[in-house]
Image: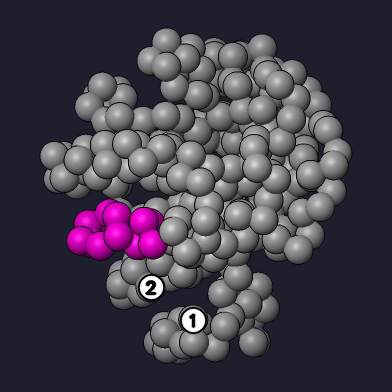
Amino acid sequence: MELEADLRHALDRHELEVHYQPVYSIVENRLAGFEALLRWRHPVRGLVQPADFIPLAEETGLILQFGEWVLRQACREAANFPQDVKVAVNVSAVQFASNDLLQVIGSALRESGLAPRRLELEVTESVLLQDNDAVVAAFDRLRALGVGISLDDFGTKYSSLSYLRNFPLDKIKIDQSFVRDMVTREDCRAIVRSIARLATSLGMVATAEGVESAAQLELVREAGCAEAQGYFWGAAAPATALDRFFVRQP
Ligand code: G
Ligand code: G
Ligand code: MN
Ligand code: NA
């Protein structure tokens, strides 16, 4: 397939980019960090979104090289952010299943000089569906370094509560599909409130995704989310275009 052939050359042709979406503490009203989101600048197709190439990268195994590159790039760029600003990197199940993820993270941190407590990893439940003991051991070692672990897209798919019992997690990210309809639907408000309360009682942070309006911000704050991200503050942008987030308060 043509797309696959192109994807194989994306790294050596320097077509991959990391964009950063701001994440705010809505308790302290300040920038908390950025989520690193991979983009593919295809010479003909233009900027390709992750939904259109990450699945293919996972099937072909290319995600191992891409994921390593994203980790190194995000740590390197985040080392230039202000000291209290974190970076969250999405890590796929394929990467967790590989043997050298911990070494890759260790060397990305060392090379960049980024403090481990400024790095967070976002995992989806597909990571948690793998060999339990190995994943718990990897999470434990990462958390011992100070690296945070977030559970992404919570509330979609199976979202078993046993994940919250069995895995050491720092943060739950509430899927944007719930946040989107909070203004009009009491059931979505109740779901977000319940997930936020659950997270908080387990000592985890609840982050609301997809906040686009002041009304939604007010509702996720009322619901008990400590952090939020979304177009209300901004879409993901290259590291060179983030200055406005460092000076402006929400
Ligand atoms: O930026 P966008 O909202 O289109 O990203 C969609 C999804 O793609 C993210 O929520 C995330 O799950 C996935 N994604 C983005 N960047 C990366 C990456 O570097 N690695 C992995 N594994 N997934 C990513
Ligand atoms: O899979 P993950 O949740 O990490 O990626 C988030 C996706 O949602 C990205 O593709 C990003 O571009 C998109 N996104 C981020 N903020 C908003 C928002 O406020 N509204 C909508 N509709 N999409 C958003
Ligand atoms: Mn994510
Ligand atoms: Na998500």
Q: Is 105 contained in the magenta span?
A: yes
Numbered circle sitting on residue 133:
none
Give the answer, above or below, for where 74 lies relative to 40: above
Task: Name the quarter where the C terminus is drawn.
Answer: top right
Residue 229, quarter of picture: top right
Q: Residue drawn 57% across and 83% down? A: 14
Where is residue 53 shown, x and y percent of the image?
A: 48, 69
State which region is magenta.
94-107
Where is residue 97 shown, x and y percent of the image?
A: 22, 57
Residues at marks 2 and 1 touching, judged by CB atoms closer than 8 Å: yes
Q: Residue drawn 47% across and 14% down? A: 200
Q: Is residue 231 visible?
A: yes
Say how the picture is coloured: one colour
Instruction: Name the side, left or right, on which 232 lies relative to 34.
Output: right
Q: Main secondary structure of the magenta part?
A: helix
Q: Residue at label 2? A: 65
Q: Residue drawn 36% across and 30% down? A: 169
Where is residue 232 shown, x and y percent of the image?
A: 77, 38
Task: Name the quarter where the N terminus is drawn.
Answer: bottom left
Give the answer, above or below, for where 223 lies relative to 176: above
Which is more N-terminal, label 1 or label 2?
A: 1
Residue 62, quarter of picture: bottom left
Q: Residue at label 1? A: 11
